[in-house]
Image (cartoon, rainbow, N blue to C red):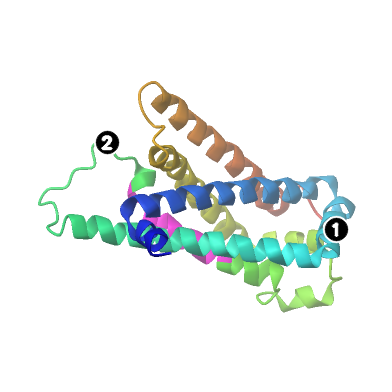
Amino acid sequence: MTSISSFYRSSVGCKMVMALTGIGLVGFLCAHLAGNLLVFKGPEALNHYARTLRDYLPILWVLRVGLLAMFVLHIVSAIRLTQLNRWARPVAYTNKKNVRSSLSSRTMMLSGLVVLSFVLYHLAHLTFRWTHPEFRELGEFDVYQMLVMSFHSPYVAFFYCLSIVLLMSHLHHGIVSLFQSLGLYHGGLQPVIRAAGAGVSVLLAMGFLSIPIAIFCGWIGL
């Protein structure tokens, strides 16, 4: 146990934990988007999907706890890695230049904090229905109507869209960092990995953004 704890507290250990939890979180995003896109098929399809998840509530809660654990480990590892990097260089650069670093890599901490606030709001919004008391008057599985009512608000729609853009910026850099942690980011693989990271991020962004935009513009309604 001591060796495992020591490995986790090391820079390499933190990177590996972030890489593995990152893979799990990307998998969740893909599965979550696949379910959410059922909104384009209408209320029956989306609500049937929600009811099906509820039919396996114990399994659903196991998945939720596992997802929460991955999310917490990802955040804790990121904070730990930042601390280790600062301790390794206690004297800051006098003239720091970001010649080769991308915008997404320089804003990872900011985008991560926004994503965290987005996740917390998302849970309060649609899972526990704390932010919209009127949701409690709806049927338990009327997820379709909840989405339509929510994204008619310009504030909610804008916050979701902003959060998705920052999340995908975070993901883009995270995919590159994942391959770096696994020792696969070298030589001719670098442009392929960068292109793959950009492609995955853009596709997921388009999928997630299509829902609030379509509802706010009236293309999807009650």
Give the prevailing secondary structure in the magenta stretch: helix
**Across the whole image, how many numbered discs are drawn on residues?**
2
Question: What residue range appears in magenta?
Answer: 106-119
The quarter of the rendered structure image containing the N terminus is bottom left
Q: Is residue 133 above or below residue 72?
A: below
Mark 2 Cα shell of 10 Å, populated few (<14), some (14-19), many (≥20): few
Residue 218 visible in the shown view: no
- What residue lies at 70% left-to-right and 73% top-to-bottom? 128
Residue 132 visible in the shown view: yes
Tag 2: amino acid: Arg
The quarter of the rendered structure image containing the C terminus is bottom right
Across and down, in percent, residue 11 comes to: 32, 53
Q: Dot 2 corresponds to which residue?
A: 100
- What residue lies at 38% left-to-right and 59% top-to-bottom? 3
Q: Is residue 118 left or right of residue 148?
A: left
Across and down, in percent, residue 123 comes to: 64, 68
- What residue lies at 64% left-to-right and 72% top-to-bottom? 124
Mark 1 Cα shell of 10 Å, populated few (<14), some (14-19), many (≥20): few
Q: Is residue 194 above or below residue 1?
A: above
Q: Dot 1 corresponds to which residue?
A: 52
Distance between mark 2 and mark 1 Cα atoms: 47 Å
Q: Secondary structure at mark 1?
A: helix
